[in-house]
Image (cartoon, rainbow, N blue to C red):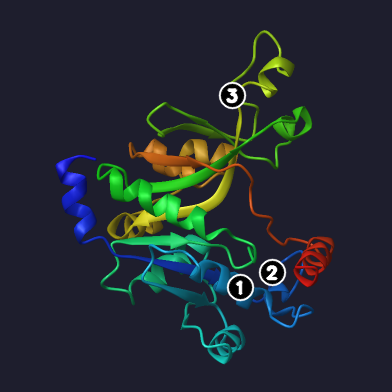
């Protein structure tokens, strides 16, 4: 670790912000489902609270109903503009109420099984690399079907952990065939995971940036960061956490939770 990084770490303060919308599209009101005895938002809050590096966890709620639920289980909630165009905007709004935060970690509200170690990993990347403004995660891709699925966002990563590009297409392109490379060690293909850590001032800057050309083509907001000339660092984890998008996802989560 450089002298600059060591100096930064002495004063490094981070918070987790969980953007929470009530009217989700595919599974309305999913954050308030409670068939395990706890709501989804409570599970996510408690999982995020297990991380060792952040000073605290805050829910950026778009409704009084979600804010009331967070306060009911003893969490901290901040009401944000219901018309916020994206989760990033909601996180940036909440971050203005956290003046002592150097880094903000964006954890999706529908990630009840988020690993605390994953949160610590993205914060650690920014602690150790003062030149980077943002960090995220990836996990190896081992199946051809997953590699070719446009819903699975891929990322190529340099040896210094820097993201080179994000795409819905298979990257890198394997001119001599994909099958041997899917089993390679170290992995050649990585799936991007939607956990982000931002430096405070860059988060505010990002929320004001217009969509970039490549972002508009791929429909991937993180390309806005790369196109503006900034670095995104990528940490690699063995397994992704499973988010809840559909009723089937939630039913599977309930079974796992009740069998623990």
Q: Are marks 2 and 3 in contact (CB under 8 Å)?
A: no
Q: Secondary structure at mark 1?
A: loop
- Which residue does the numbered mark 1 point to in the structure image? 21
- Which residue does the numbered mark 2 point to in the structure image? 24
The front one of 131 and 212 is: 131
Q: Are marks 1 and 2 in contact (CB under 8 Å)?
A: yes
Determine crowd level at label 1: few under 14, some 14-19, many 20+ residues with C-alpha closer than 10 A.
many
Q: In screen coordinates, is 158 left or right of 194?
A: left
Q: Residue at (28%, 62%) from the top-left corner?
A: 102
Q: Residue at (43%, 27%) from the top-left corner?
A: 158
Farthest residue to the front: give it.
260
Rendered location of residue 253, percent (x, y)? 77, 64
Rendered location of residue 94, percent (x, y)? 41, 73
Rendered location of residue 111, percent (x, y)? 63, 63
Q: Earlier in the sequence, mark 2 or mark 3?
A: 2
Q: Which circle marks residue 188 in the picture?
A: 3
Q: Earlier in the sequence, mark 1 or mark 3?
A: 1
What is the CA distance from the residue labelled 1 to the residue labelled 2? Answer: 6 Å
Farthest residue to the top: give it.
176
């Amino acid at each position: 670790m450089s002298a600059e990084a060591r100096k930064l770490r002495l004063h490094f303060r981070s918070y987790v912000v969980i953007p929470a919308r009530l009217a989700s599209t595919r599974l309305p009101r999913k954050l308030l489902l409670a068939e395990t005895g706890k709501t989804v938002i409570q599970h996510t809050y408690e999982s995020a609270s297990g991380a060792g590096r952040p000073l605290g966890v805050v829910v950026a709620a778009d409704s009084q109903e979600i804010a009331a639920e967070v306060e009911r289980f003893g969490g901290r909630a901040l009401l944000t503009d219901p018309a916020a165009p994206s989760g990033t905007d909601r996180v940036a709004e909440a971050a203005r109420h956290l003046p002592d935060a150097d880094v903000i970690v964006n954890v999706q509200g529908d990630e009840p099984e988020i690993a605390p170690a994953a949160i610590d990993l993205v914060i650690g990347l920014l602690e150790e690399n003062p030149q980077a403004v943002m960090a995220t995660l990836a996990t190896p891709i081992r199946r051809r079907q997953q590699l070719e699925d446009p819903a699975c966002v891929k990322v190529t990563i340099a040896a210094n952990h820097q993201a080179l590009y994000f795409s819905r297409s298979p990257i890198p392109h394997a001119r001599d065939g994909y099958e041997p490379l899917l089993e390679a060690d170290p992995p050649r293909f990585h799936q991007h995971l939607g956990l982000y850590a931002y430096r405070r001032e860059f988060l505010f800057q990002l929320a004001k940036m217009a969509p970039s050309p490549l972002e508009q083509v791929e429909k991937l907001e993180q390309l806005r960061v790369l196109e503006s000339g900034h670095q995104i660092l990528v940490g690699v984890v063995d397994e992704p956490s499973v988010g809840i998008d559909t009723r089937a996802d939630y039913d599977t989560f309930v079974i796992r939770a009740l069998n623990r």
